[in-house]
Structures are given as structure tokens and as C-alpha cells.
Image (cartoon, grey):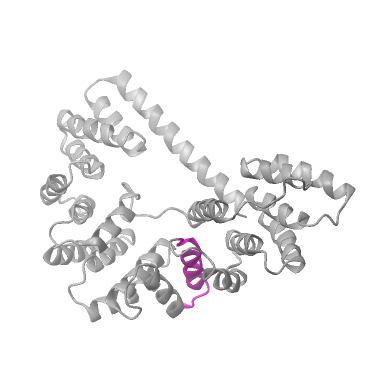
Amino acid sequence: MTNANDDMFVRAWRQIRFSPRRISLHFFVAICLFLASAALSQQSPPAKTSESPLAPAEALLSQGKPGEALSLLQSIASRDPKTPGLEAKFGKAYFQSRQFSQAVQHLNAAIEENPNDLEATQLLALSYYGSGHFAQAIPLLERVGDRLPKDNADAPYLLGVCYVMTQRWDEARKTFAKMFSVTPDSAMAHLMLGKILVRQKMEDRAVPEVETALQLDSRLPMAHFLLGEIDLYQGNKEAAVAEFQKELAINPTVWLVYWRLGDAYVRLQNYEQAEKVLKEAIWLNESSSGAYILLGQIQLKKGDAGLAVGFLERALKLDPQNYYVHYFLAKAYQNLGRDTEAKQHFEICKSLKSEQLNEERSIFQENQ
């Protein structure tokens, strides 16, 4: 029987689309920082600075205009470098600009000026996190954790990631367990940590965590699935099939498992079994674009471009921004002699892939 834990893993893995590889760490860091800073802005009470020379800069920061705010702050600093709160505003502006090293310098100065400045402390922790200085971020995140609203999970999550990145495995597991309301030494807590480790590209370290989870609960949902995903990423296709089949023996109602099992069969060129399980994935979830893509790919391998077009056009409606859909649809149209449509989709595929690479490159550079 499925449960809330299954849904959690389904939502996470759906974001991976066609490939089992995760979003890059830098891309994920940028998302975390965006969410955390947005939450911080919402929870921080507006300062009574209507008559302060820093009020216009704060207004610009609230509007998401850090460049303009920095220009204004530099002008204020040239007139009065001792303006109260100036260092904190500089730190916030540099943080919003993702210039983390400069943010760290000013935020440290702000905290020296006012050790009780919660916003500066949070931003300093996020700046250390964003620049990859996880050890320095930990004590700050530990300090502010109890001072956040109970429904704010940003700081605990980032703290857990910092524990992971500094190899403090027990603290990481306990932190994530508390976040997701599970017992710290339970099977699910170990599985949670395994999932986070996979997300951080630490597959080898994730495997023993998942194996420990299965030792504690041999029928733990989604544990064999995660092992299968690791096997599939590492190219161990037969091992992946075995793990996905074990998962289905425990929990046969999660469409995601059938989809990934179908992917493994496609890689093994076992198209008959692949078609069977991919159709089962669709019966459980008609919006599974990945299953339609793989079915289209199979028909292309079999030489039936007409049937491939049917599957791929359905996938296109479900996921128009997926460049794999456009690529295989272009191949199918090409095989049918529909050259104009094929050229159009090859161009869309190229454009979408280029946009994704440029976005990831930009975020990577921002976080250096």
C-alpha cells in the first residue's frame, strides 16, 4: 500500500524527467538560497527606518534591485561610513547580488556591531552556504534555528546539507529525521539520508544508508527503488532491474517504479518487457511523459515511426519543454518524410538544450 512517504519520493524524482541524474549542486544551492532569502524577507518585521538614510536602499532591496541599492549605499558610505546599519545593508545587497565573499565581509562587520541582528546572522549563514563554506555556516544555522517560525524548514534543511557536506552523518540524519517527523534511528531516517546523499552526488555513501534502512525494515517502501536508481545511473542495468522488481513486490502501485524499470529494460534492449511495464506506468499515471517518451523510442527502434509519433505527440502535450521529446519526435517525423516538422523540432530541441546549459552555467558562475 502506498503512503505519504511514497508520494514524497515520487515528487522528488519526477523532477528528473528522462534522465536519472540529479540537478547540479550549484543549481540546487541557488534554489535553496532563493527560497531561504524569500522566507527571510517575509518573516523579518519591517524596520522603522522611515527617516533613516538607509530607507531608500532597503526599499530597493525589497524590490529586488540590489545593484541600485549598492550604488546608493556606496554614496551614503562616502558621506558617512559610520552610518548605523550600513554594514548590514551592504551585506544584504551583496547577498542578493550573489557576491557572497563581499557579503560575508560586511555581514561579519554588521554582527560585530549588533550581535542580536537575526537577519544579518541568517544572511551570513546563507552566504557561507552559497560559497561552499559549509563548516562556517553550521554554527550560524544552529544558532538561528530555534529562532525561526516553527513552519520554516529552510534553515534546518540547509543545516542538514552542511552536515552532509562536512561528513557529519549522524547529525545530518537526525536533522532530516526531525524535519520529516520520523524517528532519528528508524529505517525511514536512514532512507531519508540516503536520498539526500544521492541528491548531493554521493551515491557510494548513500548505498550503506539504504542498506541499513532495509536491515531495519526489509519491506520499507522506496528503498529498493533508490538502490535501483543508483544502479541505473552507474550503468548496472541488470542490478537495477532486480532492485525495481523487489520494489514492485513490496509496493506495486507506484507508477514511478514501472517507468524506471521500463527505462532499465530499454537500456538492456528488452523491448517486450519494457513496453509491458511502461504501459503499466501509464495506467497508473496517464500524465507520465517519461513513459510515453520511452515507448516512442522503442517504436523508433522497431522501425514503426507512425506509432512512435503517437506516443511522442502525447508526451509533447504533457511536457513541451522537454528537449528529449522534441528530439525523438523529430527523428520520427524524419523517418516518415515529414522533413519540415522534423527540422522544426530539431531546432526546438537544440534551443531548449542550449537554454538549460546556459542557465546552469550562469548559476554555477554566480556561486563561485
Image side of residue 146 versus residue 203, left or right: right
On the rendered image, what quadrant is the N terminus found in? Answer: bottom left
Q: Is residue 228 above or below residue 260?
A: below
Image side of residue 56 versus residue 46, left or right: right
Residue 143 percent coordinates (x, y): 58, 73
Residue 364 sits inside the magenta stretch: no
Overall secondary structure of the magenta stretch?
A: helix
Residue 258 falls in which quadrant of the image?
Answer: bottom left
Give the total number of marks visible in the rendering. 0
Residue 99 percent coordinates (x, y): 67, 52
Q: Is residue 230 above or below residue 11?
A: below
Q: Which residue shows up at 12% across the image and 60% down it?
A: 252
Residue 223 percent coordinates (x, y): 25, 68
Residue 165 sits inside the magenta stretch: yes
186 or 330, nearer to the observer: 186
On the rendered image, what quadrant is the C terminus found in? Answer: bottom right
Image side of residue 119 versus residue 26, left or right: right
Image side of residue 249 versus residue 148, left or right: left
Q: Is residue 230 above or below residue 337?
A: below
353 or 56, nearer to the observer: 56
Residue 122 falls in which quadrant of the image?
Answer: bottom right
Q: Which residue shows up at 15% across the image and 31% down it?
A: 307
Start and end of the magenta stretch? 152-168
